[in-house]
Image: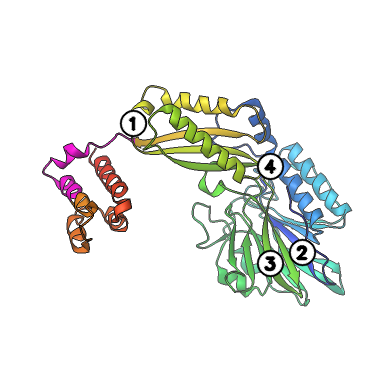
Amino acid sequence: MASSGSGVRAAGDFCFVHAADLHLDTPFKGIGETAPHVATALREASLDALDNLVELCLDRKAAFLIVAGDVYDGTERGIRAQLRFHDGLRRLSDAGVWTFVVHGNHDPIEAGWSAIQSWPERVRVFSSGEVGVAVVGEPEAPLAVVQGISYWRRDVTENLARRFSRQPASSFQVGVLHCNVSGAAEGHDDYSPCSLDDLRRSGLDYWALGHIHTRMVLSGRPHGEEPWIVYPGNLQARSAKAAERGAKGAVVVEVVDGRVAGADFVACDLVRYAAVDIDASHLGSLENVRDACTEAARDELEAAGGRSILLKGHLFGRGAAHEQLRRPAALEELLLALRADAGSSVPFCWWDRIEDKTGSMLDLEQMANESDFTADLIELARHLRAADAPFDPDLLEEITSGLPKDLRARAAAQATAELLEHGLTVALGDLATDST
């Protein structure tokens, strides 16, 4: 699934591929019972993504590949994952492509058993004792200098970035590190914590980072700063968390005249996680809900470009479908129906789960006859909806002063004729929910 390579490069110009967090042969987390064809695809996804990564390097005629930690998911590394990784790097080595690898918190270099006794000629696995330095090309006129260090245990709390420094060579220089840059992302363990300033002080041209599963460019274009500091994200999603959704793959870095000319993401994944929000407020029956879900799944599959999808559905809105969705086992049966509708086609869309956050319809007439805040809000909405009623911001502020801040802001933003009804329903619905 790698895209076609770039054109002919000038002498001294090159590209390299930056990947991280392969988690080879990892089990998908949070996935319940699946159909056989889905289970097979999930079992092979991380290894097939590795094959796509190798093809990407060959297709782009990369000078080298960087793997910035967490090659495996744990210290008990599966034999087939190790052999598949070795075979892929041997293909690259035979084609003249170097590979530089560091180990991270999931696969520290001094833990676990290794089935690999020797690596291909053009493979360098950096040790954990000190920052290793490798030269790509002729020592007298190197194409690039790559530095890296592996974790020796899982819980590395030292700021390893401070160990890196620019080498005397005038060539392009890369640092490879599995770390957590402060402020980059939430929800990740603070292994080898460092700051952007720590990375910049090294004097390197490009930092190839791993550990954060969300793709991020922390420095470099479009930031207009140097050096480039990049998280490519993981190679293949492995859970339903928000950071695992969307396209996953590697970054192809083009170097022209000794500087980064571009860093382009290329998808390598086989299976994607996605989440869809479906407004059920105008869906009168479960059949309508199923049709809306099917249409949403079709759109997600089309957007995935030939990849399979693990889909989570979120139903919201107030309407007639709510009462049917509340029936015993209705959600479970809807889920089974959607899975059956998808069949055994490949690429597949497997509905992992559906959440029902719908609500019952609001009786506006009854609420308007009450002598409380909701009745005042309905009166205001009807006043604004009248064709000859000018919009009065002061009146809106007065009548919504009792709302929570987020609802007050939403009411102000939606106080137009065409959005008024929807805004009123949202506000009243939230009030009804808060009062229960």
Query: The residue under label 3 is which amino acid type?
Result: Gly
Mark 2–mark 3 Cα distance, whole angstroms, equals 10 Å
Q: Position of residue 232 (x, y in %)?
A: 64, 57
Lower sequence index among marks 2 and 4: 2
Q: Count how many numbered circles sit on residues in the image.
A: 4
Q: Position of residue 216 (x, y in %)?
A: 58, 60
User: Does residue 280 sit above or below 265 in this rendering?
Assistant: above
Badge number at residue 262? 3
Mark 2–mark 1 Cα distance, whole angstroms, equals 57 Å
Lower sequence index among marks 2 and 3: 2
Question: Please, which residue is most extreme toward the left here?
Answer: 371
Q: Is residue 239 visible to us here?
A: no
Which residues fall within the magenta stretch?
Answer: 359-379
Q: Position of residue 185 (x, y in %)?
A: 51, 57
Q: Secondary structure at mark 4?
A: helix
Badge number at residue 320? 1
Q: Secondary structure at mark 2?
A: strand
